[in-house]
Amino acid sequence: MTIEPQRSATEGEANTVQQITTSSTRASDATARVLTNYIGGEWIPSSALATAPTRNPATRETLALVPLSGQSDVAAAVHAAADAAEEWRATSPLARARALFVLRDRLAAHRHELSLLVTRNMGKTLEDARGEVERGIESVEHACAVATRLKGQNLEGVARDVDVELFRQPVGVVAAITPFNFPAMIPLWFLPYAIACGNTFILKPSERDPLPGERIVELIGSIDAIPAGVVNLVQGGHDAVNALLDEPLVDAISFVGSARTARHVYRRASESGKRVQALGGAKNAMVLMPDADPELVLKGVLGSAFGAAGQRCLAGSVAVLVGELEQQDLLRNRIAETAAQLRTGDGTDQATDVCPLIAPEDRLRVEAEIERAEAEGATIVLDGRQGGGAGGAELAPTVIEPRDIESAIAREEIFGPVLTLVRQPDLASAIAWINRGRYGNASSIFTSSGDAARQFRWGIQAGMVGVNIGVAAPVAWFPFAGWKSSFDGDLHANGDDAFEFYTRKKVVTTRWR
Ligand code: NAD
């Protein structure tokens, strides 16, 4: 049994780790390259004295040192973006779309290099990393539709000699703050739409794996049609984030990360009057109906729960077994037996199904959650806590049946390769149990009944829903975000919402006699 990637690459090409292994990425902590910020078209050293190492999760090799930029670095980036705003806004939508065509081609030409960089910096398997990069390219392709999407509305003759027109204009200077688990794709959920709509942009990638984001910005720097200051990059952690949230010249914030940080970002940015979309954490449940195709169930559930070691916002971390007790037992055993065969290891090894966690401290955190569940009387159906290769960051698939289905292991995000099993007698109780949870990112059902699928689609409280699909990731032409505690804001990422989020509407009422 191998794990399906979130989405496989569309093109195959031989890759070798050596392709992007440079002297700087091999360096030890002492000699590692210190990353710089990209401001107004120049790579500029951060004013920060403090740095944090970013490592290869599989080998713990230090790849670079990330400067923990502060307010003055953020202010410099914001001013560069503000200075470039008027000229960029005056560039025609068609010219901006053509700049994105070039970006699309640049990313496609570097797709294998970028995938390998994602694997080396974040840890996920190469197959998974390729899927991530393709998804990012897809957002750029969608953003190329900008000239069509920015068209306004009009209504002639609302009163004698009076006409009304609606125009869409850019919001201004916008920033994206992104998480570690999709270091290439998530910056591309925002950057192409933001600049397509005529905004100027600042990226603050996760300090844990900032290299794919840096490389994307480097590629942008080589595109003449995207002038200096339109795209900027600030490396750092909390201080850089808070400076962006407080900066009066920043008009909109796009955030993706944990629910707790999302709420912080939403509150603080709203306080200074910004437009905000803050995508948070998740606890996604998969309902397994007794009439489901067993092959689809196994493939879907294992891929969703253990792919990227459970470090996906769309990870199905709870399987809700519906039906007769004996049938539930059989399925539980099959899931555990098949999960036990998955291979944990370095993401660059083609035999690997389950990659390491981003860092050993994350393994310790997830282990502590397993121990807590055990202490609360849960049955550890499959225990992945042996070993701990990859410098202590690996954790093998773990399957848990809690005694209390309201406990943390069943209700809170663990963000590791841990699948929790919950039993319910029927579909209605399964939907009701899921809806009582505080998250609403995604949810899936496995069934061969159209009626059950429809009931589920109707009643489930989630922004993204799968039917016989374990990872229900919408393509870029549809909006991506959850409900309830998984999302703070109104307009989702991608889809039509992206063009809405990055534009303001102006309505002009005119009288000509
Ligand atoms: P995180 O919240 O720790 O970090 C995200 C970003 O916020 C980073 O850039 C980080 O520097 C910054 N940050 C973290 N804590 C902060 C604080 N206290 N103040 C200011 N800034 C802060 O998230 P993560 O661990 O990098 O990513 C994993 C989380 O992201 C999971 O919860 C996952 O579900 C979620 N996620 C959600 C989606 C979605 O679409 N809803 C997609 C991907 C990831």
Image (cartoon, rainbow, N blue to C red):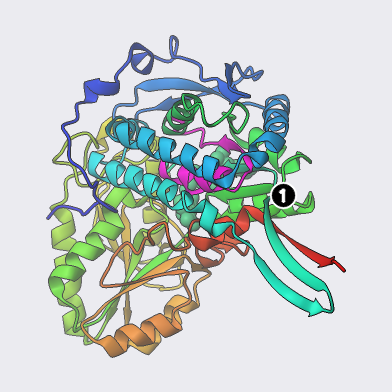
**48 up-or-down from 281: above or below:** above
Which residue lies most toward the right here? 513
- At 58% from the left and 49% from the top, the residue drawn is 255
In the image, 297: left or right of 488?
left
Give the percent coordinates (x, y) of residue 72: 73, 25
Q: Hey, which quadrant is residue 294 in on the image?
A: bottom left
Magenta part of the chain: 183-211
At label 1, which amino acid type do we have?
Answer: Ala
Percent coordinates x, y for residue 18 in the rendering: 23, 20
- The residue closer to the viewer here, 398 or 218, is 218
Picture layout, residue 486 above or below residue 104 = below
Image check: 138 left or right of 100? left
Residue plotted at (17% across, 82% down): 327
Indicate the quadrant containing the N terminus: top left, top right, bottom left or bottom right: bottom left
Q: Residues within 10 Å of mark 1 (few under 14, many from 20)?
A: many
In the foreground, 345 or 135: 135
> Front-most of 502 and 227?
227
- Residue 449 horizontal/vertical position (percent): 24, 86
The residue that appears at 41% across and 73% down in the rendered structure is 404
User: Is 420 on the left-hand or right-hand side of 483?
Assistant: left
- Does residue 130 appear in the picture of this structure? yes
Residue wearing tag 1: 269
The answer to whether any part of residue 122 appears in the image is: no
Tell me if residue 186 is in the magenta stretch.
yes
Q: Is residue 366 left or right of residue 256?
A: left
Name the residue at 55% across, 61% down.
497
